[in-house]
Amino acid sequence: MASGHLVANPAWLTTVLADYYPFLQERVPPAWLPKLDDPKAKGGRLTARMKEYGCGAYGCVIPTLDPDVVLKATTDTTETEFAAKFSKELVVPVVVEYFLVVALAARHEGQRVSLLWRESAAKVGELGEGTARYGRALERAVDKQHDRAKKVLLALRDGVRSMDALDAFFAAWVKSLDQMGELPELRYVASGMKRIWLEQKIFISDVHAGNLGLCRRNGKPEWVITDPGNVVVMQ
């Protein structure tokens, strides 16, 4: 889910999925259809409830019939573009794996809605909880990185394009990644983000405690990015 306060399951999500359900039945594997609970028959119609894992500023994440795959409906064009073009090219898979991207004709608040099927993650937004050894240090390290990333993003949005001018901002951000990596729990995601930037010039700017979750990498659970919003690819 994108950054922002969680809200109740919105009507637009239900409408979009209801309108496109026949399309989804034809185009996606049956196991990737939205999971529907508490089906009831009434007056010749079948109704059911749709659970969501959370909704943010740009969209909602819901379970599918496959416990290892979730479906996100989003208007975030940066995540959609990242999922379609760059997610499979990362030198280190520090982002949840995306399996399928479908852009719909439907719009919400003027923005086109896309459906993203991606790897399910555990304990999303629970970084630091139940970690007696480091406690709040994990969140503080990620928050510091996030603050420095926002300074880079603000400079880019202000029109700064010269790498000479941006070097200091990026250097400070990379230093915060090194500091994150000093904590064993965060070493995988921090070192991966650093390599992705240095080797591929892909800047994942919106990484905070709320969009980190656990996925299996190299045979063990690692913290990875569940919502790579505001991704910038520097040329």
Image (spheres, helix red, strand yellow):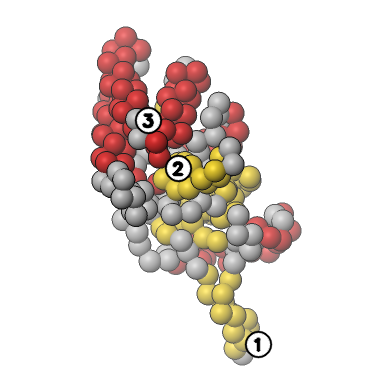
The disc placed on residue 111 is: none
The reply to whether residue 90 is visible in this rendering is yes
The disc placed on residue 223 is: 2
The answer to which of 220 and 121 lies nearer the viewer is 220
* Mark 1 or mark 3: whose residue is earlier in sequence: 1
Residue 153, percent from left and from top: 32, 29
Report if the CB atoms under discs 1 and 2 are less than 8 Å apart: no
| Residue carrying label 1 | 44
Q: Secondary structure at mark 3?
A: helix
Mark 1 nearby-residue class (10 Å; few <14, some 14–19, many ≥20): few
Residue at 48 percent across and 25 percent down: it is: 196
The answer to which of 27 and 61 lies nearer the viewer is 61
| Residue carrying label 3 | 181
Q: Secondary structure at mark 1?
A: loop
Kind of residue at disc 2: Trp
From the viewer's perspective, is residue 22 above or below residue 103?
A: below
Residue 62, percent from left and from top: 52, 60
Kind of residue at disc 1: Gly
* Mark 1 or mark 2: whose residue is earlier in sequence: 1
Whether residue 32 sits left or right of residue 227 in the image: it is right
